[in-house]
Each structure stands twice: as C-alpha cells, then as structure tokens.
Image (cartoon, rainbow, N blue to C red):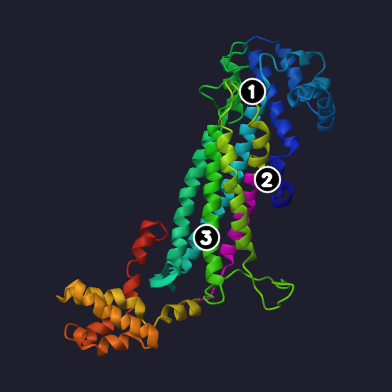
Amino acid sequence: MIDRYSQPEMQAIWSEKNKFSIMLEVEVLACEAMAELGEIPKEAAKTIREKADFDVDRIKEIERVTKHDLIAFVSSVAEYVGEDAKYIHLGMTSSDVLDTSFSVQLRQAGLLILDRVDRLIEVLKKQAVRYKDTLAMGRTHGVHAEPVTFGLKLAMWYTEMCRQRERLVRAIDNVSVGAISGAVGTFANIDPQIEAYVCEHLSLRPETVSTQIIQRDHHLEYMMALANIATSLEKFATEIRNLQRTEIAELQESFAKGQKGSSAMPHKRNPIHCERVCGLARVIRGNVTPAAENCVTWHERDISHSSVERIIMPDSTALLYYILGIFTNVAENLVVNEDQMQANVEKTLGLVFSQRVLLALVESGVARDTAYPWVQENAMRAWDEKIPFHDLVRQDKRITEHLDATTIDNIFDYSYHTKRVDFIFRRAGLID
C-alpha cells in the first residue's frame, strides 16, 4: 500500500535502507558510548564508526538461515567491520535496536505529516478570510436553518486543524522515546548512560520504564492522532461532496483540462478526490483497533505486536500524508459558486427569518406560546403555497398589531445573521 499511495519522501522513511541505516546508527552510537565509559577500546569504536555498513540483500540471505532479522543485520554489519565487530550489540537485545529505530521512523514520518498539516492550515486560513462575508445557507438535519457565511465553515475547519496540529505535536513528542535497557529492561548488562547517549543523538528521550520493549501506548496515541486528523479530513471532504451535489451546486472540486468524469456520461464532474479522502480515512481509523490491541503483550514481551505494526504504521502515515496533500489541493483550488449560495439562501422564500419574527413578537409583549403558532402557520403556508414569507407576515393582522411595516422589513435583513462574523474571526485569530 505504501508504494501506491505514498510520495517519495514518505517512502524513503519506511524503506529498508532507512530502517537499517537507523539501526546501524543505534549500534554505532552504543559502541561510542561504551568507549566513552571505558567498556570497549576507543580505537574499536572509531573503526566501527568508519567501517560499519550493511547490504540489504545480504541481510535477507542471512535471515533465510537464521530466521532472525536482527541477528542477520548484525552479521551483515560484522562482515564490513571485521575483528572489532565483537563489540557491536554488547549487552543489548533486539528490541533495543528495533524499537529505538522504529521511534526514529515514527518521528520522521510525523514531522513530515506536520509539514502538510501546516500547509493545510495556511490554505484554510486564506480561504476563510477570502469568503468571510460570502452568504451561505446553514443547514441542520440537512434542512435549511439560518444563514451563515461560507467563510465561517472554513474558519471552523481552520480551528479544528489547529487543534489537530496540537494533538499531532504531542503524539510525535510522546512517541520520540528510545530504550537501550537489555533483555527485560533492567540494565543488568548495559549502563543506562549508553541509553542516554544514544537517545540524545537521535533526538529521543529515554523511556522511563521499559521491559524488553517500549510500551505500545506511545504508539497507540500516535495512531489515534493520525486517525483524528484523517477523520477531520473526511468530515471536510464530506461537506464538499454534499455541497457539490447537483441539487445544491455551491461548491465543486476543480476540474482539470482533459479530465474525464465518467466513461459513460460526458457531462459528469465528480468529487473524486474528496471521495478518495473519505475512503482512505476509514482505512486509517481501522488501524486504531490493532494499535490498541498491540498494547497487550505477555509479561515483559512477546512479538504479537511486531508483525502488525510493521503494516499499520507505514500504511497509516503514508495514507495520511497522501490525503493531506490531496485535500490541501482541493481546498486551495475549490470552485465556489457564490451566486448559487445566494440563490439557495433565498430558495425557502424568507423562511430563514422565522426565528427573528418570533423573537420580535416576544419582545413586543406577545407570549411565546401565542406567537409561535402564528409564525409557524405563515411559515408552513409560505412553503406549501410558494408565497414569500415576508408577504404573509405583513398580511397577518395578528402580527401587524404588534409589529409595524418598517419593523417587519428590518427583520428580513440578511446582515443581521452575519453581524458577528468578524467577532468570531477575531476570536479564531483569523483577522486582527
């Protein structure tokens, strides 16, 4: 999956070359730390730094015999280093290398995703300000409610992505842990200073308490952050898909020259990118459950988690990176039909002002339980008979006994609904 949906920079992070390169750096740093502590000769550590290397094909060849990936890796490295290879991996267990390296990869992938989150936030901010005052219909239960602005929709997306950014930053920090603590995490055969040295050079912090492995609640929080972001993207994409429906026609994904929408119907322009975002977001969310189940292992460690995370983590980071790129492009090039937005606002013949009429009657002294049926009766008639609600209100003597013509005319003013848009935008940090 990663090869199909990822882009080169994300593919590189999850490549075998990068994985083994990080593992090699863990081993070399550990040797350097041991040399500083006087546990191995400094010349040996220097030789290991200069000569240590690996060959992916050779690792696979050795693993076919050993049936153990870490032993195969160390054996390949030893072939490059020579005699001093005897100092590599002293007092360490496989997970010291594998888990610490995995944390580095997760951090690298997270930071790459963070760049795209920042880019999307930038685009949403720009678009929100651009359409701040563009009147649009607010809908609840899929039914016309009261006017909003399209900019407010985008402002909500912007603030949600800002929150998602905070979650992602926390998750990256939480997963940036290493452990070089030995077979069951007791440091019986390795000095804790070695762990500290390795982690410092890899931009990690030592796991406070480990067993043979770094505990997978770190990974679960990371996966949940990815799923949370993916869910926001699906939410935004679903709104675009709905507003692109022919019956609404307020938005449209950009349509490139030469693009085809259907093999059968030449007129079709489908929201294919938003649909792709929605579909792949479901895959990412689906990986939360196995990430949670990976937290449960037998005693100090089993390997039930290992095969799972080698799939779900590369796939989830790659998919999120991919759909962030897709949706950012959609948002930046979105076709906004402002005329249709206005037409849709007016489609209900002024019914969006029903609450204003009700409130004005209450403010004039009419009991709410009395006023509500008056307004509702006129609203239903307007809709059923296709008569402007404004006209019916002005003709209803029950209402005009309490509201004069000027007051009624002022009620039917769209600017009433948008008067605090600037307040909301300032509170969101979108305008000064």
Residue span colored magenta: 316-337
Q: Nearer the viewer, residue 19 or 125?
A: 19
Task: Tell me whether the residue at label 1 lies in contact with that at label 2, contact meaning CB atoms closer than 8 angstroms.
Answer: no
When asked about the image quadrant of residue 270, the answer is: bottom right
Q: Residue at the location (80% across, 21% down)?
A: 75
Which residue does the numbered mark 3 point to in the structure image?
A: 236
Label 3 Cα neighbours within 10 Å, binned few <14 / some 14-19 / many ≥20:
many
Of the two numbered discs 3 and 2 in the rendering, the one whose residue sits closer to the viewer: 3
Q: Is mark 2 on a helix, strand or loop?
A: helix
Which amino acid does the dot numbered 3 rest on?
Phe
Q: Where in the figure is residue 294, as x and y percent of width and height?
A: 59, 33
Which amino acid does the dot numbered 2 rest on?
Met
Is residue 333 highlighted in magenta?
yes
Which of disc 3 and disc 1 is earlier in sequence? 1
298 sits left or right of 400 in the view: right
Q: Which of 417 and 224 is in front in this view?
A: 224
Q: What separation in Å lies between label 1 and label 2 (alpha carbons)? A: 24 Å
> Can the viewer see residue 240 in this picture?
yes
Which residue does the numbered mark 2 point to in the structure image?
A: 10
208 sits left or right of 315 in the view: left
| Quadrant of the drawing holding the C terminus | bottom left
Q: What separation in Å lies between label 1 and label 3 (alpha carbons)? A: 41 Å
Which residue does the numbered mark 1 point to in the structure image?
A: 96
Q: Which of 401 and 341 is in front in this view?
A: 401
Q: Where in the figure is residue 128, as x and y percent of width and height?
A: 47, 64
Q: What element carries label 3?
A: helix
Q: Residue at the location (35% across, 85% down)?
A: 382
